[in-house]
Amino acid sequence: MSNTIDNLLHEARRFPPTEEFAAQAIADAGLYERAAADRLGFWADQSRELLHWHTPFTRTLDWSEPPFAKWFDDGELNVAFNCLDRHVLAGNGDRVAIHWEGEPGDTRTITYAELTAEVKKAANLLTSLGIRAGDRVAIYLPMIPEAVVAMLAVARIGAIHSVVFGGFSAESLRSRIDDAEAKLVITADGGWRKGRVFPLKDAVDAALTGDATSVEHVLVVKRGENEVAWTEGRDLWWHDELALVDADHVAKAFPAEQPLFILYTSGTTGKPKGILHTSGGYLTQAAFTHKNVFDLHPESDVYWCSADVGWITGHTYVVYGPLANGATQVMYEGTPETPHPGRWWELIEKYGVSIFYTAPTAIRSFMKLGRQHPQKFDLSSLRVLGSVGEPINPEAWMWYREVIGGDTTPIVDTWWQTETGAIMISGLPGVTTLKPGSAQVPLPGISVDILDEAGTPVGKDQGGLLVVTEPWPSMLRGIWGDPDRFRETYWSKFGDKYFAGDGARYDKDGDIWLLGRVDDVMNVSGHRLSTAEIESALVAHPFTAEAAVVGAADETTGQAVVAFVIIKQNQLEQTEALDVAAELRKHVAEQIGAIARPRDIFIVSELPKTRSGKIMRRLLRDVAEGREVGDTTTLADTAVMSSIQAKLS
Ligand code: PRX
């Protein structure tokens, strides 16, 4: 049973670009040829073309001390100038940068000229508070325009932001503040979520009590209008302070390798890692991928990425990529189901969104709710859809295309990580013949491979571990304060090749299929099975809304497949009298083979997910193995585990 993912790889549907789309597409097949002929020359050309360099670079890559790369390192630029002033100087100041929509329905339209003016003032404010180039500023804000302003203001003065997702607890915020030794926190009184105000300033206060901290000031944006406690001398209102500073600010150039941000992400164990990104290389790949992967025509497109700025997707594809490219985008504060389950689709109709980028988990929740909600709205403005964050199963891909994309839009399935900074593997709309469920090919200028445990490339129709074989412009430059962990985590397994931590497989055409984190790969009776593959089989069954699969220790087989399944609302009645678990076990065996048949299937009403929507399989594994459930503090809803356990007992 070596071909256990045949189920996925037998996906036969193909979607070649239409002639009409290809004719207007930004990307063309020549990009691959140019990059293959001279990879470094290709990136140098892209960087010169897409960015404004105050001091042009003459060196493209310095890889003399791997794994510490330097890109364009004798050049100088200002990241914020690239995202703002230069568009105004080019005559596009009146173009809308952000159509912002608050959850309660309040709106703001912000042009490039207005955003530039705001950021200039904010940069002066930061300077007046003693923030200098290289200092760290923590940002803990809801999805409001000030989040973008704050990030760009920090970047403009050469300081380093560390955005902490607003859903993280005071404790997580504190550990991130301490690790980076942040001097300033920018937060809000509160933000809107699920129809009510959630407090943020309270969490900052809680984070800063106790032992002395590095934080000197807390800037507070007024958004929720909720009451807040105030520490005189430390706390300052954002709007009051901005009213006092100069409107003018000249962007100074910084070296290409000036640190831009730290973003914390969880490792397999231990404390979160502060992933460090720098300026010139990061912005080059952010702009290149945003333009080519989404086929961005900045003068006519309306782009929307639903990610929060607290995650890497929000950094690269809400802030830096779109703004570097002068795009017009939608930014939404709240949750998709508030005040009604069609809110996202309503926004797409309202703003005429043409490019939409979201996560498979969101798509599957919408599938669960049913197509009647999107069908109430006119989604015909959409012309490109994107997916990110986890493998998208072919059923979800097809639903996304048919129901949201009117059966016409290309879907780009984009593989990348916090560490990679920008998209690495994806089809290009207008060029690639798309395959539902496969992320397909490395982008031009990116070199990846799939290796076996011994480090040998596996070749077509084989699976193994995904690596990046050559340095890339937006690669992480390290883990903040921990060079050893950086080497150990990513560069010790295969020497100078970057180990991504994902399993992957080439199909017969050489297209890449992501199989999930290798920590989620199961070994059943000596056979490798991917959780993604079995989940995909389960959700392809008409009963199933969502499924999560874990490998649980088993005396006989090493590991056994255990599945947690949510049944579709409209199937509940029909399935009442059936042995649903038996039916699904049979289905998986039919789809993949007997080896993949789950030992146990538990029907549950919810799955444990992090605030970014990732299923926490570690907790399900605890349940499956009859252990006490581990740390649940990063769950969006900590009650989910009790409800699952109650179902099983
Ligand atoms: O397992 C891969 C999965 O998400 C991981 C990276 O997570 P994070 O750093 O939070 O960044 C998410 C947004 C870029 C990867 O190691 N992943 C991301 N995109 C895909 C994916 N898995 C399959 N297909 C994707 N398109």
Image (cartoon, grey):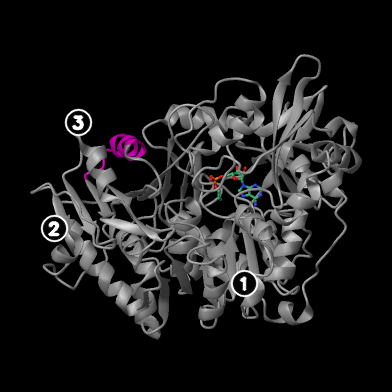
Q: Residue furthest left?
A: 233
**Picture layout, residue 550 above or below residue 408:** above
Residue to which mark 3 is pinned? 210
**What's the magenta bit mostly, secondary-structure-wise?**
helix
Toward which corner of the image does residue 24 lie, by quadrant? bottom right
> What residue type is disc 3 on?
Gly
- Residue in the picture at 42% in, 71% down: 101
Toward which corner of the image does residue 168 lie, by quadrant? top left
> What residue type is disc 1 on?
Asp
Residue to which mark 2 is pinned? 128
| Left or right position of 67 against 180 | right
Distance, label 2 to label 3, CA atoms, is 27 Å
Residue to which mark 1 is pinned? 295
Secondary structure beneath disc 1?
Answer: loop
Disc 2 versus disc 3: nearer the observer: 3
Toward which corner of the image does residue 607 lie, by quadrant? top right
Earlier along the polypeptide chain: callout 1 or callout 3? Answer: 3
Disc 1 versus disc 3: nearer the observer: 3
Secondary structure beneath disc 2?
Answer: helix
| Left or right position of 73 against 217 | right
**Structural crowding at the residue carrying mark 1, measured as other residues with C-alpha within 10 Å and reported as few (<14), some (14–19) or many (≥20):** many
